[in-house]
Image (cartoon, coloured by chain):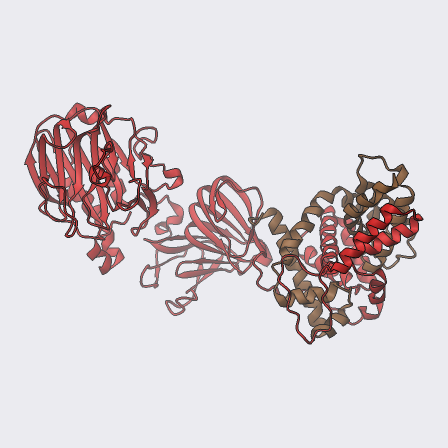
Chain colours: A red, B brown
Amino acid sequence: MNDQTRLRLIALLNALEEGLLNESQQAELVELLKASDEAQHFYLRFQMLSAGLGEYAHEGGLPEQEQPGLPESMTIQYSAPSKGSQGAFMSAMSYLANHAFTPKRIATIASAAVLGFGLILTIVLLFSSDPTSESAQLPDLTPPAPTPDPYRVVATVTDQVNAQWITTNGQGVLPDRMLLAVNQRLTLTEGFAEVTTKRGAKVLVQAPAMIETTESDNAIRLHHGKLVGRCETPSSKGFIVHAPGMDVVDLGTVFGVTADEINGSTVVVMEGAVRAEPTETSPHAFAPVVLKQDDARRVVPGTGQLETITVAESPIFYEQAPHPYVQAVLNAKPLAYWRFEDDKSHRVVNEIDPGLYELQHQGTARINESDHHGRSARFDSTAEPFGAFFLGDVSLHEIGQTDLFTFECWFRVERPVQGSLLSLYEADPDEPKHIIYVELQPGEGFEPRKGSDWRFQSIRVAHCDPPNIDGSAGTNLLSDATYRLDTWHHVVVVKELDRLKVYLDGQLAGETQTNRDLADNARLSLGRVQKKEKPGFPLRELVRPMDGWIDEVAVYNRVLSEEEITAHWNAGNVQKSQLGDKSREKGEPPL
Amino acid sequence: MQRRFLPLWTQHQRRVFAYIYTLIPNRADAEDLLQETSITLWEKFAEFEEGTDFVAWACQVAYWKIRNARRKYARSPIIHNDELLSSLSDKAIAAQPELNRRHDALADCLGKLSDRDHALVMSRYETDSTIKEVASQTGRSVEAAYKALFRIRQALMDCVTFRLEGFGS
């Protein structure tokens, strides 16, 4: 049953329901129904709806609907399921149970009592109409224009390949041919999916992408990601893809649209033509332009201007390369690299080897969207149990074999408490022993532990050799540069044989001599120190929970050179120029 | 034996009515036939095998009543086409579980109607008013009332489908 047939069937059924079908229309309906099982099923559903409407109205009101507040001018007397009608039903039951009746009387009483729940059958008969008298008055069966309705189906997920989704109802696999109502937002996290609008336009969406249906049955909104639109049916002509900063209107074609925060929105015409228009929110950003095959345009983030690009420059045709910072870290071959981008079940996968060094979650630590275009580990020093991401029972054996170690991450401090960024420790049945810890020194108003060397908002690095429970033996290093609140910083700690160094934002910020050895059974904890509770001793002081964000953590069993550290800082910091002056001041990494 | 009839009939008559309404889409006619069917079912209830499908049995009885009273229900457009009548009857009985679910979903969807649409539905269905009467009662033109009901039915169809098959399920 095609769209045209379906619309005609709907029109005929509505006329039938109102008793307005003339003879030729009746014949047309019969022919339509005879022609397909689908039409018959649709007919049954429609009639069931009509029967249901009558039943609910007879019962005296629509379910769960507050009293309808009928206008006073209306003459209908609204009658909820009254004691009277219920009483009639109950009395009929009782009467039947206790008296012998002729079948016809019983059925009559039962019907009158049960059937209408209080509505006397004769009233119905009085109100029945003569359909033929009105049929000539409404020859036009044109459907009315659709109006907004929260459950109106506007699209269908028509095909999926290894697709995983996040929706408002959860995450996972969607059933085949999932219907999408208006304003339905979906995130495709893996695989591909084809979505077909009610008017027949198809879009092939590639993960990762977020799409949303709109009020229209011939449009899709692309929040980010990639899609290819194809309009093969006449009714789908004019299909629109709403992308950030640009609406792409189909003029009978195949086209690709991409959207991401860094590169903006792009459109590439593969066949036919489209019209690129500014969005309603930026109506004068650029003049609408018709694009033909092999044309490509990009909306520049920030300005909203439309610039001409080559087809090859559009991300639709290639996998987006990892961000330069991520690529730089991957190229440096760390032992482990945790990006905190996957917020499913707090899993933190090692990007270098997903089967090795997966971090576990502890306490109130969270993976959250942060203010630098991705997710990060969030720690709250005020929320117990104090949180961490840590390796559990797994040790980083490699670093003890070389006595070389580099720790690298981005962090942002919300409250300047004495908080632990990194703790490498040796498991011990009695008490975990420090090997190396990297600690944020407190700011004004947050006094450090007594006895410690300290400087407001500096980075403290301790190398404990031999490993011990209180840092009593070993080396302390305080950075001469300090961190700022609510600012993303890049920190690198290097242990190179007998040298210990700390770098802040690409610059060497402290260096000292230390012992050569590193224990080879180091376990790792981020965001707090793993310590046993001691009676009478505040737990906060023992575990030193950080208050803020940590992201892009990498550990190496080699030493990053100063050139590499500078390059990492530059790669991570390059985004600042794209984010504008405010971001530059705040030093936000882009990841 | 007959005492067991009323509870069964009370429980299932809505479904039998809906079945009849699909074949005789006129409320008054359908209710007439429902009453006649109930009498026959009562008379023949001794033939009903306990444990079998009461609704299917009742629908079969109704079906033969419809076939035997074509002249009375002549305004149904499908009643004169044996093949179509039989096909729709079979499908209506087979689709009872689905139609039942749709009926339940309809209750939720009705609750979503605006006050104005709600009033229109009540005006149309509470007393089975004609479109002319609905127009008069609601202060609309006949055409406006017709199109508004058209739109409401379409929205409800979509809503029911959505609730059963879409995200709202």
* A38 or B101: nearer the viewer: B101
Is A95 drawn above or below residue B28 in the view shown?
above
* Foreground residue among B120 and A449: A449
Front position in the image: A115 or A413:
A115
* Residue at 8% from the left image edge and 28% from the top image edge: A515
Query: Position of A140 compared to A106: left or right?
Result: left
Q: Quadrant of residue A319?
A: top left
User: Residue lying furthest right in this view?
Assistant: A102
Q: Position of residue A589 (x, y in %)?
A: 25, 49
Q: Residue at x 13, y 35 (%)?
A: A462
Q: Tell me where residue A95 appears, x and y as whole percent.
A: 86, 50
**Residue A433 sits in which quadrant?**
top left
Q: Is residue B57 above or below residue A429?
A: below
Residue at x 27%, y 36% (from the top left corner): A337
Residue A366 in view: yes
Residue A562, x across and y down, in percent = 12, 40
User: In the drawing, does residue A231 fall left or right of residue B86?
Assistant: left
User: Camera-side residue: B125 or A321?
Assistant: B125
Percent x, y of residue B57: 83, 41
State left or right for residue A487 relative to residue A318.
Answer: left
Task: Please say whether residue B30 is visible from this viewpoint.
Answer: no
The number of discs equals 0
